[in-house]
């Protein structure tokens, strides 16, 4: 399984970005895997900000709830993190991850940088 993120960049506060996580070697529509979005700010530990459970249920950490959403394109095997009303504290490297259990996560993307000024 390989995960490749894209879509990061620089944006002003209040703006939006849409991150992509393209999966190969695994069919998003097949279930059985947890999917997660994480971020790591400079000098901080990595935190999980979003989780897609194996039954498709999504959940978000409080700091992004109401601003971030997850969508999936099953045809292209891509899942997206839509980020709206971005704040400077959202600046971080964002990672997607997948696996059959929550810890440890089996597969990670390479990360994509988000900078909010």
Image (tube, helix red, strand yellow):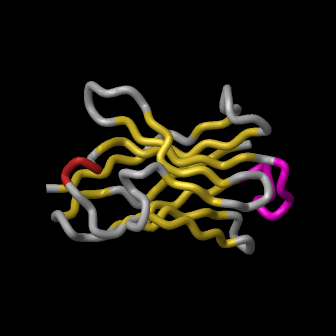
Nearer the observer, 71 or 21: 71
Q: Residue 98: x, y in percent?
A: 68, 43
Q: Residue at x 64, y 69 (%)?
A: 72
Q: In the visual, does 100 lie left or right of 60?
A: right
Q: Residue 77: x, y in percent?
A: 70, 64
With respect to residue 18, does 111 lie above or below?
above
Q: In the visual, does 60 lie left or right of 115?
A: right
Nearer the observer, 9 or 53: 53
Q: Residue at x 79, y 51 (%)?
A: 26
Q: Residue 29: x, y in percent?
A: 81, 64
Nearer the observer, 17 or 68: 68
Q: Residue at x 66, y 54 (%)?
A: 52
How many numbered discs, if any? Answer: 0
* Residue 104 painted magenta: no
Q: Residue 10: x, y in percent?
A: 23, 58
Q: In the visual, does 103 lie left or right of 94?
A: right
Q: Which residue is farthest front? A: 62
- Name the quarter where the N terminus is drawn: top right
Q: Residue at x 59, y 70 (%)?
A: 71
Magenta residues, start to end: 24-32
With respect to residue 71, does 36 lie above or below?
above
The image quadrant of residue 87 is bottom left
- Name the quarter where the C terminus is drawn: bottom left
* Residue 30 painted magenta: yes
């Amino acid at each position: 399984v390989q995960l490749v993120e894209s879509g990061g960049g620089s944006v002003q506060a209040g703006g939006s970005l849409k991150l992509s996580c393209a999966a190969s070697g695994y069919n998003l529509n097949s279930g059985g895997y947890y999917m997660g979005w994480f971020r790591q700010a400079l000098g901080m530990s990595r935190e999980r900000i979003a989780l897609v459970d194996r039954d498709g249920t999504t959940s978000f950490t409080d700091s992004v709830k109401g601003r971030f959403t997850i969508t999936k394109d099953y045809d292209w095997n891509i899942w997206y993190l839509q980020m709206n009303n971005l704040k400077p504290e959202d600046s971080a490297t964002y990672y997607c991850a997948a696996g059959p259990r929550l810890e440890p996560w089996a597969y990670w993307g390479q990360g994509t940088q988000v900078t909010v000024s």
